[in-house]
Image: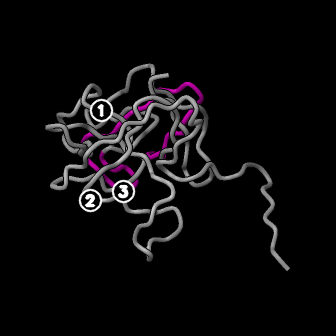
């Protein structure tokens, strides 16, 4: 007999890097810089010499953020990856969201609010606060505020996955 799952309050939002509302999305395929590839899906990325790299420098600004690294589906990655933790390729092509909605991991202790400012961590990574990750509160020079066209669409789920709007 199959087991049934009941969601008392809210169904999980999905996985970091999942494209949402595809009908309004602008997605570009870009070359990965194999010397500095993104290490996770759903993180801010930049273009360096025409190739995608993760945000990886305290001198990166909001203007340096090119888009968000999308989790391609279907994707065949390492067979030992647990559910929802796919490892991005280290070379070749990847999809970058330039405009639309995407699920991301909410980092830091501050809850996301609908319409809230999106911050990207650019320095001083720590537990639960990776560089290139998204946060709902400023942390001095360690984060940069994205333009008003980037915002949270609501609070995170129980797994800290939330949706952000990009250039909407």
The CA span between labels 1 and 3 is 22 Å
Residue of label 3: 127
Number of numbered tags placed on the structure image: 3
Instruction: State the residue at coordinates (53%, 53%).
Output: 15
User: Which numbered marker is on residue 116?
Assistant: none
Q: Give the percent coordinates (x, y) of residue 2.
A: 82, 76
Viewer-proximal residue among 36 and 49 = 49
> Is most of the magenta stretch helix, strand or loop?
loop
The CA span between labels 1 and 2 is 19 Å
Instruction: State the residue at coordinates (44%, 77%).
Output: 80
- Give the residue at the far top of this rendering: 148
Provide the residue span drawn in magenta.
105-131
Q: Is residue 98 above or below residue 44?
A: above
Residue of label 2: 90
Which mark is first along the chain, 3 or 1? 1
- Is residue 124 shown left or right of residue 166? left
Instruction: State the residue at coordinates (46%, 61%).
Output: 75
Instruction: State the residue at coordinates (81%, 73%).
Output: 3
Q: Give the percent coordinates (x, y) of residue 142.
A: 27, 37
Quadrant of the image occupied by residue 127: bottom left
Q: Assign a secondary structure to mark 3.
A: loop
In magenta segment, residue 112? yes
């Amino acid at each position: 007999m199959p087991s049934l799952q009941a969601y008392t309050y809210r169904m999980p939002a999905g996985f970091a890097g999942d494209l949402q509302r595809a009908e309004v999305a602008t997605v570009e395929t870009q070359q990965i810089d194999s010397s500095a590839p993104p290490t996770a899906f759903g993180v801010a990325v930049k273009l360096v010499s025409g190739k995608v790299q993760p945000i990886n420098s305290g001198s990166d600004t909001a203007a340096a953020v090119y888009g968000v690294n999308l989790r391609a589906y279907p994707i065949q990655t390492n067979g030992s990856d647990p559910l929802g933790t796919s490892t991005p390729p280290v070379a070749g092509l990847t999809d970058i969201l330039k405009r639309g909605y995407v699920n991301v991991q909410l980092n830091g202790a501050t809850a996301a609010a609908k319409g809230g400012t999106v911050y990207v961590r650019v320095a001083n990574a720590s537990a639960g606060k990776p560089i290139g990750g998204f946060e709902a509160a400023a942390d001095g020079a360690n984060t940069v505020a994205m333009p008003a066209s980037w915002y949270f669409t609501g609070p995170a789920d129980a797994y800290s996955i939330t949706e952000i709007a990009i250039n909407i």
